[in-house]
Image (cartoon, helix red, strand yellow):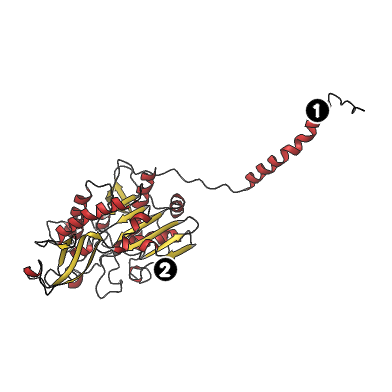
Amino acid sequence: MPPPARSPAWGPRRRTLLLPFLLLPLLLFLLHLASSPSPRPLPAPRKPSQACDYSAGEWVRDASAGPALRYEHTCKEIFKGWNCIANGKANGRDMLRWRWRPSGPGCELPRLDPRRFLERHRDTKIGFVGDSLNRNMFVSLVCMLRGVSGEVRKWRPAGADRGFTFLHYNLTVAYHRTNLLVRYGRWSASPNGGPLESLGYKQGYQVDVDVPEQTWVEACSFHDVLVFNTGHWWWAPLKFNPIQSPMLFFEKGKPIVPPLLPSAGLDLALQHMIMFVNKAVRPNTFKFFRTQSPRHFEGGDWNEGGSCQRSQPLSSEQVEEFFSLDNNGTNIEARLVNKHLMKALEQSTFRVLDITRMSEFRADAHPSTTGGKKHDDCMHWCLPGLTDTWNDLLALNLESFES
Protein backbone atom coordinates (compact mmCIF):
# COMPACT_ATOMS: atom_id res chain seq x y z
CA MET A 1 0.00 0.00 0.00
CA PRO A 2 1.61 3.35 -0.98
CA PRO A 3 2.38 5.86 1.84
CA PRO A 4 -0.12 8.63 2.29
CA ALA A 5 0.62 11.75 0.27
CA ARG A 6 2.01 14.76 2.26
CA SER A 7 0.49 18.16 2.12
CA PRO A 8 2.32 20.60 -0.19
CA ALA A 9 2.81 22.84 2.88
CA TRP A 10 4.83 20.16 4.75
CA GLY A 11 8.22 21.05 3.18
CA PRO A 12 8.29 24.74 4.23
CA ARG A 13 6.87 23.84 7.67
CA ARG A 14 9.66 21.27 8.22
CA ARG A 15 12.35 23.78 7.29
CA THR A 16 10.86 26.29 9.71
CA LEU A 17 10.98 23.72 12.54
CA LEU A 18 14.64 22.79 11.83
CA LEU A 19 15.99 26.34 11.43
CA PRO A 20 16.47 27.10 15.19
CA PHE A 21 18.44 23.86 15.64
CA LEU A 22 20.70 24.70 12.69
CA LEU A 23 21.36 28.23 13.96
CA LEU A 24 22.01 27.23 17.58
CA PRO A 25 25.74 26.28 17.15
CA LEU A 26 26.40 29.51 15.26
CA LEU A 27 24.75 31.58 17.99
CA LEU A 28 26.77 29.81 20.69
CA PHE A 29 30.02 30.45 18.77
CA LEU A 30 29.23 34.16 18.36
CA LEU A 31 28.41 34.44 22.07
CA HIS A 32 31.78 32.85 22.88
CA LEU A 33 33.63 35.35 20.73
CA ALA A 34 31.78 38.24 22.30
CA SER A 35 32.62 37.13 25.82
CA SER A 36 36.29 36.30 25.13
CA PRO A 37 38.92 39.05 25.54
CA SER A 38 40.20 39.99 22.11
CA PRO A 39 44.00 40.06 21.66
CA ARG A 40 45.46 43.53 21.76
CA PRO A 41 46.64 44.43 18.26
CA LEU A 42 50.24 45.55 17.86
CA PRO A 43 50.67 49.24 17.11
CA ALA A 44 51.75 50.17 13.64
CA PRO A 45 55.49 49.89 13.04
CA ARG A 46 57.52 52.96 13.91
CA LYS A 47 59.90 53.68 11.09
CA PRO A 48 62.99 55.82 11.55
CA SER A 49 62.24 59.12 9.87
CA GLN A 50 64.50 60.12 7.01
CA ALA A 51 64.59 63.62 8.51
CA CYS A 52 65.83 62.36 11.88
CA ASP A 53 69.49 61.74 12.65
CA TYR A 54 69.37 59.26 15.52
CA SER A 55 73.14 59.23 15.93
CA ALA A 56 73.21 62.98 16.63
CA GLY A 57 71.11 65.04 19.02
CA GLU A 58 71.02 66.06 22.66
CA TRP A 59 70.02 64.73 26.06
CA VAL A 60 67.00 66.48 27.54
CA ARG A 61 65.57 66.24 31.00
CA ASP A 62 62.62 63.82 30.94
CA ALA A 63 60.03 65.05 33.41
CA SER A 64 57.75 62.13 32.56
CA ALA A 65 60.32 59.54 33.68
CA GLY A 66 59.81 60.24 37.38
CA PRO A 67 61.29 57.64 39.72
CA ALA A 68 60.11 54.68 37.60
CA LEU A 69 62.76 52.26 36.33
CA ARG A 70 62.63 50.49 32.99
CA TYR A 71 63.49 47.33 34.90
CA GLU A 72 64.36 46.63 38.48
CA HIS A 73 67.96 46.86 39.63
CA THR A 74 67.32 43.47 41.21
CA CYS A 75 67.52 41.83 37.76
CA LYS A 76 69.88 38.94 38.47
CA GLU A 77 71.74 39.20 35.19
CA ILE A 78 73.20 42.63 36.07
CA PHE A 79 76.91 42.26 36.76
CA LYS A 80 77.53 43.43 40.33
CA GLY A 81 79.95 46.19 39.36
CA TRP A 82 77.39 47.75 36.99
CA ASN A 83 74.53 47.85 39.47
CA CYS A 84 74.90 51.51 40.41
CA ILE A 85 71.61 51.75 42.33
CA ALA A 86 72.37 48.74 44.51
CA ASN A 87 75.95 49.96 44.97
CA GLY A 88 74.76 53.36 46.18
CA LYS A 89 76.02 55.63 43.38
CA ALA A 90 74.82 59.12 44.29
CA ASN A 91 73.18 59.81 40.91
CA GLY A 92 72.21 56.18 40.23
CA ARG A 93 68.54 57.07 39.79
CA ASP A 94 68.82 60.67 38.70
CA MET A 95 70.89 59.79 35.62
CA LEU A 96 67.89 57.81 34.32
CA ARG A 97 65.82 60.99 34.05
CA TRP A 98 67.35 61.97 30.73
CA ARG A 99 66.20 60.96 27.26
CA TRP A 100 67.93 61.20 23.91
CA ARG A 101 66.33 63.63 21.48
CA PRO A 102 67.61 63.02 17.93
CA SER A 103 68.42 65.84 15.55
CA GLY A 104 65.59 66.96 13.29
CA PRO A 105 62.26 68.73 13.77
CA GLY A 106 59.89 66.77 15.99
CA CYS A 107 62.23 63.77 16.19
CA GLU A 108 61.93 61.29 19.04
CA LEU A 109 63.59 57.97 19.78
CA PRO A 110 60.76 55.77 21.11
CA ARG A 111 61.50 53.60 24.11
CA LEU A 112 61.69 49.88 23.53
CA ASP A 113 58.37 48.32 24.56
CA PRO A 114 59.39 44.92 26.00
CA ARG A 115 56.06 43.18 25.34
CA ARG A 116 55.89 44.53 21.81
CA PHE A 117 59.49 43.44 21.23
CA LEU A 118 58.72 39.90 22.39
CA GLU A 119 55.62 39.71 20.18
CA ARG A 120 57.38 41.05 17.09
CA HIS A 121 60.37 38.77 17.48
CA ARG A 122 58.71 35.45 18.18
CA ASP A 123 60.81 32.50 16.97
CA THR A 124 63.86 34.74 16.64
CA LYS A 125 67.44 34.38 17.84
CA ILE A 126 69.49 37.50 18.64
CA GLY A 127 73.24 37.28 19.26
CA PHE A 128 75.55 39.93 20.70
CA VAL A 129 79.16 39.24 19.68
CA GLY A 130 81.96 41.26 21.21
CA ASP A 131 83.66 42.47 24.36
CA SER A 132 82.20 43.36 27.77
CA LEU A 133 80.51 46.48 26.38
CA ASN A 134 78.35 44.25 24.20
CA ARG A 135 77.62 42.20 27.31
CA ASN A 136 76.52 45.49 28.91
CA MET A 137 74.02 45.91 26.06
CA PHE A 138 72.95 42.25 26.15
CA VAL A 139 72.17 42.44 29.89
CA SER A 140 70.13 45.60 29.38
CA LEU A 141 67.91 43.88 26.79
CA VAL A 142 67.52 40.70 28.85
CA CYS A 143 66.48 42.65 31.95
CA MET A 144 63.92 44.70 30.02
CA LEU A 145 62.36 41.55 28.55
CA ARG A 146 62.43 39.60 31.82
CA GLY A 147 60.42 42.38 33.41
CA VAL A 148 57.36 41.27 31.40
CA SER A 149 58.15 37.61 30.72
CA GLY A 150 59.78 35.62 33.50
CA GLU A 151 59.41 32.15 32.00
CA VAL A 152 62.92 31.67 30.61
CA ARG A 153 65.46 28.97 29.94
CA LYS A 154 69.05 29.90 30.74
CA TRP A 155 71.58 28.17 28.52
CA ARG A 156 74.60 28.69 26.24
CA PRO A 157 73.43 28.40 22.63
CA ALA A 158 75.94 28.01 19.80
CA GLY A 159 78.95 28.38 22.07
CA ALA A 160 77.66 31.54 23.77
CA ASP A 161 79.04 32.78 27.07
CA ARG A 162 75.43 33.07 28.29
CA GLY A 163 71.93 33.17 26.85
CA PHE A 164 68.21 33.11 27.57
CA THR A 165 65.20 31.80 25.69
CA PHE A 166 61.87 33.43 26.52
CA LEU A 167 59.80 30.27 26.32
CA HIS A 168 56.36 31.75 25.65
CA TYR A 169 57.73 33.58 22.60
CA ASN A 170 60.59 31.25 21.59
CA LEU A 171 62.86 34.33 21.49
CA THR A 172 66.53 33.67 22.29
CA VAL A 173 69.00 36.38 23.30
CA ALA A 174 72.66 35.35 23.71
CA TYR A 175 76.08 36.90 24.31
CA HIS A 176 79.25 35.56 22.68
CA ARG A 177 82.38 36.91 24.33
CA THR A 178 85.31 37.84 22.10
CA ASN A 179 87.85 40.59 22.69
CA LEU A 180 89.34 40.98 19.21
CA LEU A 181 86.82 38.97 17.11
CA VAL A 182 89.85 37.03 15.83
CA ARG A 183 91.78 34.23 17.53
CA TYR A 184 94.80 35.14 19.62
CA GLY A 185 97.12 33.52 22.14
CA ARG A 186 100.58 33.60 23.64
CA TRP A 187 103.56 33.36 21.28
CA SER A 188 107.14 32.49 22.23
CA ALA A 189 110.24 32.48 20.06
CA SER A 190 111.25 29.13 18.63
CA PRO A 191 114.79 27.87 19.38
CA ASN A 192 114.97 27.03 15.67
CA GLY A 193 114.48 30.68 14.72
CA GLY A 194 112.07 32.23 12.25
CA PRO A 195 111.03 35.54 10.62
CA LEU A 196 110.02 37.16 13.93
CA GLU A 197 112.93 35.70 15.85
CA SER A 198 115.33 37.18 13.29
CA LEU A 199 113.88 40.61 14.11
CA GLY A 200 114.58 40.12 17.79
CA TYR A 201 111.12 39.14 19.04
CA LYS A 202 111.15 36.78 21.99
CA GLN A 203 107.49 36.74 23.09
CA GLY A 204 104.14 38.36 22.46
CA TYR A 205 100.64 37.51 21.31
CA GLN A 206 99.92 35.72 18.05
CA VAL A 207 96.86 37.36 16.48
CA ASP A 208 95.43 35.39 13.54
CA VAL A 209 93.68 38.10 11.52
CA ASP A 210 91.89 35.59 9.27
CA VAL A 211 90.63 33.15 11.96
CA PRO A 212 87.52 33.99 14.02
CA GLU A 213 87.63 33.24 17.73
CA GLN A 214 85.91 29.93 18.45
CA THR A 215 83.41 31.50 20.88
CA TRP A 216 81.30 32.91 18.05
CA VAL A 217 82.00 30.75 15.00
CA GLU A 218 78.64 28.97 15.33
CA ALA A 219 76.75 32.18 16.08
CA CYS A 220 76.56 33.22 12.43
CA SER A 221 74.55 30.19 11.31
CA PHE A 222 72.44 30.15 14.50
CA HIS A 223 71.15 33.69 14.98
CA ASP A 224 68.68 35.75 12.96
CA VAL A 225 70.04 39.04 14.29
CA LEU A 226 73.73 39.69 15.04
CA VAL A 227 75.19 42.73 16.82
CA PHE A 228 79.01 42.92 16.66
CA ASN A 229 81.57 45.16 18.31
CA THR A 230 85.30 45.32 18.83
CA GLY A 231 87.80 48.05 19.66
CA HIS A 232 88.73 48.42 23.32
CA TRP A 233 91.26 45.60 23.36
CA TRP A 234 93.06 46.85 20.26
CA TRP A 235 94.26 49.86 22.26
CA ALA A 236 95.17 48.05 25.51
CA PRO A 237 98.88 48.68 26.13
CA LEU A 238 98.90 46.94 29.51
CA LYS A 239 97.57 43.74 27.92
CA PHE A 240 99.44 44.00 24.62
CA ASN A 241 102.53 45.91 25.69
CA PRO A 242 104.33 46.99 22.51
CA ILE A 243 107.71 46.07 24.02
CA GLN A 244 107.12 43.19 26.45
CA SER A 245 104.09 41.46 24.85
CA PRO A 246 103.31 42.99 21.46
CA MET A 247 100.53 41.97 19.10
CA LEU A 248 102.15 39.87 16.36
CA PHE A 249 99.85 39.46 13.39
CA PHE A 250 99.60 36.21 11.44
CA GLU A 251 97.80 35.45 8.19
CA LYS A 252 97.34 31.94 6.81
CA GLY A 253 99.34 30.71 9.77
CA LYS A 254 102.44 32.74 8.94
CA PRO A 255 103.70 35.94 10.59
CA ILE A 256 103.19 39.16 8.69
CA VAL A 257 106.61 40.75 8.15
CA PRO A 258 107.39 43.53 8.67
CA PRO A 259 105.13 43.48 11.76
CA LEU A 260 102.03 45.68 11.68
CA LEU A 261 100.92 48.29 14.17
CA PRO A 262 97.66 47.45 16.01
CA SER A 263 95.70 49.92 13.86
CA ALA A 264 96.77 48.16 10.64
CA GLY A 265 96.11 44.79 12.27
CA LEU A 266 92.59 45.92 13.13
CA ASP A 267 91.95 46.91 9.50
CA LEU A 268 93.05 43.50 8.28
CA ALA A 269 91.08 41.64 10.95
CA LEU A 270 87.89 43.58 10.16
CA GLN A 271 88.32 42.86 6.45
CA HIS A 272 88.62 39.12 7.07
CA MET A 273 85.85 38.92 9.68
CA ILE A 274 83.35 40.78 7.50
CA MET A 275 84.05 38.28 4.70
CA PHE A 276 83.70 35.37 7.11
CA VAL A 277 80.36 36.58 8.46
CA ASN A 278 78.94 37.21 5.01
CA LYS A 279 79.73 33.63 3.99
CA ALA A 280 78.60 32.02 7.25
CA VAL A 281 75.25 33.70 7.94
CA ARG A 282 71.91 32.44 6.71
CA PRO A 283 69.94 34.42 4.13
CA ASN A 284 67.98 37.38 5.53
CA THR A 285 70.10 37.61 8.70
CA PHE A 286 70.19 41.15 10.10
CA LYS A 287 73.84 42.13 10.68
CA PHE A 288 74.69 45.15 12.81
CA PHE A 289 78.06 46.54 13.79
CA ARG A 290 77.88 48.78 16.84
CA THR A 291 80.21 51.77 16.89
CA GLN A 292 82.67 52.31 19.71
CA SER A 293 81.53 53.04 23.24
CA PRO A 294 83.46 56.03 24.68
CA ARG A 295 85.33 56.19 27.97
CA HIS A 296 85.33 59.25 30.26
CA PHE A 297 88.55 59.25 32.28
CA GLU A 298 89.65 62.61 33.67
CA GLY A 299 93.04 63.31 35.21
CA GLY A 300 94.70 60.31 33.57
CA ASP A 301 93.87 56.84 32.31
CA TRP A 302 92.42 54.07 34.49
CA ASN A 303 95.87 53.03 35.77
CA GLU A 304 96.99 56.63 36.32
CA GLY A 305 94.38 57.67 38.87
CA GLY A 306 91.81 58.79 36.27
CA SER A 307 88.24 59.26 37.47
CA CYS A 308 84.70 60.08 36.31
CA GLN A 309 82.88 61.96 39.08
CA ARG A 310 80.39 64.01 37.05
CA SER A 311 76.69 63.95 37.90
CA GLN A 312 75.31 65.59 34.73
CA PRO A 313 75.73 64.95 31.00
CA LEU A 314 78.49 66.92 29.27
CA SER A 315 77.85 69.96 27.12
CA SER A 316 78.76 69.89 23.41
CA GLU A 317 81.87 71.95 24.14
CA GLN A 318 82.97 69.55 26.87
CA VAL A 319 82.42 66.58 24.55
CA GLU A 320 84.90 68.04 22.06
CA GLU A 321 87.42 68.66 24.83
CA PHE A 322 87.15 65.00 25.81
CA PHE A 323 87.14 63.35 22.40
CA SER A 324 88.61 65.59 19.72
CA LEU A 325 91.41 63.76 17.92
CA ASP A 326 93.27 67.08 17.71
CA ASN A 327 93.61 67.13 21.50
CA ASN A 328 95.11 63.61 21.58
CA GLY A 329 93.62 63.08 25.04
CA THR A 330 93.03 60.03 27.19
CA ASN A 331 89.67 59.15 25.64
CA ILE A 332 90.32 59.46 21.89
CA GLU A 333 90.07 55.68 21.48
CA ALA A 334 86.37 55.81 20.49
CA ARG A 335 86.80 58.11 17.51
CA LEU A 336 90.02 56.39 16.44
CA VAL A 337 88.31 52.98 16.39
CA ASN A 338 85.31 54.38 14.53
CA LYS A 339 87.52 55.65 11.71
CA HIS A 340 88.69 52.08 11.15
CA LEU A 341 85.18 50.65 11.51
CA MET A 342 83.63 53.04 9.01
CA LYS A 343 86.38 52.36 6.50
CA ALA A 344 85.87 48.59 6.81
CA LEU A 345 82.07 48.75 6.71
CA GLU A 346 81.83 51.23 3.84
CA GLN A 347 81.21 48.65 1.11
CA SER A 348 79.68 45.97 3.34
CA THR A 349 76.08 44.86 3.89
CA PHE A 350 76.34 45.47 7.64
CA ARG A 351 74.09 48.08 9.18
CA VAL A 352 75.86 50.52 11.47
CA LEU A 353 74.37 50.99 14.94
CA ASP A 354 75.87 54.37 15.76
CA ILE A 355 75.79 54.92 19.52
CA THR A 356 79.02 56.88 19.92
CA ARG A 357 77.80 60.47 19.84
CA MET A 358 74.87 59.91 22.19
CA SER A 359 77.23 58.15 24.60
CA GLU A 360 79.97 60.78 24.51
CA PHE A 361 77.75 63.15 26.50
CA ARG A 362 77.15 60.67 29.33
CA ALA A 363 80.19 61.08 31.56
CA ASP A 364 77.71 60.79 34.46
CA ALA A 365 76.54 57.27 33.61
CA HIS A 366 79.56 55.07 34.47
CA PRO A 367 79.89 53.05 37.69
CA SER A 368 82.86 55.26 38.70
CA THR A 369 83.94 54.53 42.29
CA THR A 370 81.02 52.12 42.87
CA GLY A 371 82.22 49.61 40.25
CA GLY A 372 83.99 47.41 42.77
CA LYS A 373 87.43 47.91 41.21
CA LYS A 374 90.62 49.36 42.65
CA HIS A 375 90.19 52.19 40.15
CA ASP A 376 87.23 54.16 38.81
CA ASP A 377 85.28 52.29 36.13
CA CYS A 378 84.78 54.96 33.49
CA MET A 379 84.37 52.51 30.61
CA HIS A 380 81.37 50.29 31.41
CA TRP A 381 77.88 51.68 32.01
CA CYS A 382 75.49 51.56 34.95
CA LEU A 383 72.44 49.30 34.62
CA PRO A 384 69.71 50.41 34.37
CA GLY A 385 71.36 53.07 32.27
CA LEU A 386 72.67 54.27 28.94
CA THR A 387 72.73 50.92 27.13
CA ASP A 388 68.93 50.83 27.48
CA THR A 389 68.94 53.66 24.92
CA TRP A 390 71.27 51.66 22.66
CA ASN A 391 68.61 48.96 22.66
CA ASP A 392 65.93 51.53 21.86
CA LEU A 393 67.91 52.31 18.72
CA LEU A 394 68.35 48.62 17.92
CA ALA A 395 64.61 47.96 18.28
CA LEU A 396 63.72 50.90 16.05
CA ASN A 397 66.15 49.74 13.35
CA LEU A 398 64.80 46.19 13.47
CA GLU A 399 61.23 47.42 13.04
CA SER A 400 62.25 49.56 10.09
CA PHE A 401 64.12 46.78 8.29
CA GLU A 402 61.46 44.16 8.97
CA SER A 403 58.76 46.45 7.64
Q: Are marks 2 and 1 in contact (CB under 8 Å)?
A: no
Q: Is residue 266 left or right of residue 81?
A: left
Query: In the rendered structure, which amino acid carries the disc numbered 2?
Result: Lys
Total labels drawn: 2
Residue 179 falls in image quadrant: bottom left
Q: Is residue 372 visible?
A: yes
Query: In the rendered structure, which amino acid carries the disc numbered 1?
Result: Gly
Between 334 and 194, the one lying in front of the other is 194
Circle 1: element type: helix
In the picture as drawn, the residue positioned furthest to the left comes out as 199
Rendering coords of residue 348 (x, y %): 25, 47
Rendering coords of residue 265 (x, y %): 16, 59
Neighbor class of circle 1 (other Cα within 10 Å; few <14, some 14-19, many 20+) is few
| Residue, disc 1 | 11
Q: Is residue 67 visible?
A: no
In the picture as drawn, the residue positioned furthest to the top comes out as 8
In the picture as drawn, the residue positioned furthest to the front comes out as 192
Between 163 and 55, the one lying in front of the other is 163
| Residue, disc 2 | 76
